[in-house]
Amino acid sequence: MDNLVQIHTEILDAFANKQDVTAVFFDIVKAFDMTWRFIYVETAYFWKWWMRQSDSVRHLFKNFVKNGQLEFIGGAWSMNDEATTHYQSIIDQFTWGLRKLNETFGDCGRPKMGWQIDPFGHSREMASIFAQLGFDGLLLGRIDYQDKDQRFLTRTPEVVWKGSDNLGDAANIFTGVMYNTYSPPSGFCFDILCNDEPIIDDPRSPDYNVDRRVDEFFRITKNISRNYATKNIIVTMGEDFQYQDANVWFKNLDKLIQ
């Protein structure tokens, strides 16, 4: 319990001082709710937080990783650009980020998914690097709007990207394009920075709307699914600088799921 109090105090202080990287790291209730799973991407920002933690907090966090409650994806020092970077620099910063995760968490910290949701454009060489690093798949956020429209029209936003003619299958990787980059569906942003209608599930309230809001969400997800050939779709819930007060998100998402 002392560990929880320490983390909670740090979050409140970070939120008050607008230290976004620290503030978004934990939601105390959800940290111990085994039905929730979380991902983290860029090792540089994680390391900035990690270096400030006590041994007791680090031990607690390692248990989250070991239990599968928190999974690192990407894992490089940063989510690198793909247009103007040299492959050697990309490999170097992946080496540094992955080494930090391996030294800290062992095999439990090894990322298995590439997560390039913010670079403006993507290169074949990047797909080849992910494949050769042993990643199982790659998710993209931003692609050319004409390419995106065509892929959604033909239900081909998910492909096996052949990263190299010379390397053959060793450079192939399953790749998917997100529907809405990394933003929530229209009308379903529950952050303190948003003004969308919250979900009210108390039947005694005159603002009760859970049935209508769930129906709206189903219509949106059904529309998203029409663009994909596979049965599983990713619906992103977040935006830049959000989750500084994560509980606002989680309260609404819990109501939506239940």
Image: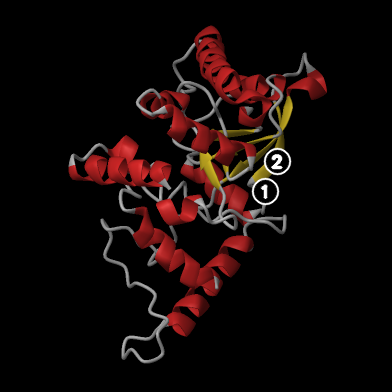
Residue at (73, 22) in percent of width and height: 171
Image height of 217 relative to 238, above or below: below
Amino acid type indicated by mark 1: Thr
Query: Which residue carries the number 2 mark?
Result: 159
Image color mode: secondary structure
Element under disc 1: loop
Q: Residue 58 location, x and y as percent?
A: 47, 31
Q: Residue at x 42, y 81 (%)?
A: 201
The residue wearing badge 1 is 156
Q: Nearer the viewer, residue 241 or 186?
A: 241
Q: Is residue 108 visible?
A: yes
Quarter of the image for residue 247 reads bottom left
Q: Image quadrant of residue 199?
A: bottom left
Q: Position of residue 25 (x, y in %)?
A: 39, 41
Where is residue 226 drawn, in percent x and y?
63, 63
Q: Is residue 53 above or below residue 256?
A: above
Q: Is residue 24 visible?
A: no
Q: Residue furthest top?
A: 88
Q: Nearer the viewer, residue 59 or 35?
A: 59
Above or below: residue 182 compared with residue 133: below
Kind of element beneath mark 2: strand
In percent of the image, x 31 and y 53: which residue is there? 245
Q: Which residue lies at the image location 27% right of the left edge and 58% below the top edge? A: 192
Considering depth in this image, is 135 or 55 the residue closer to the camera? Answer: 55
For this orientation, the residue located farthest to the left is: 17
Q: Point out the image quarter for the C terminus.
A: bottom right
Mark 1 and mark 2 residues within 8 Å of each other at the beta carbon: yes
Distance (Cα) linking label 1 and label 2: 7 Å
Describe residue 83's horizontal placement relative to residue 134 as left or right.
left
In the orientation shown, which residue stands out farthest toward the right? 169
Which amino acid type is shown beneath numbered disc 2? Answer: Val
19 relative position to 89: left or right? left
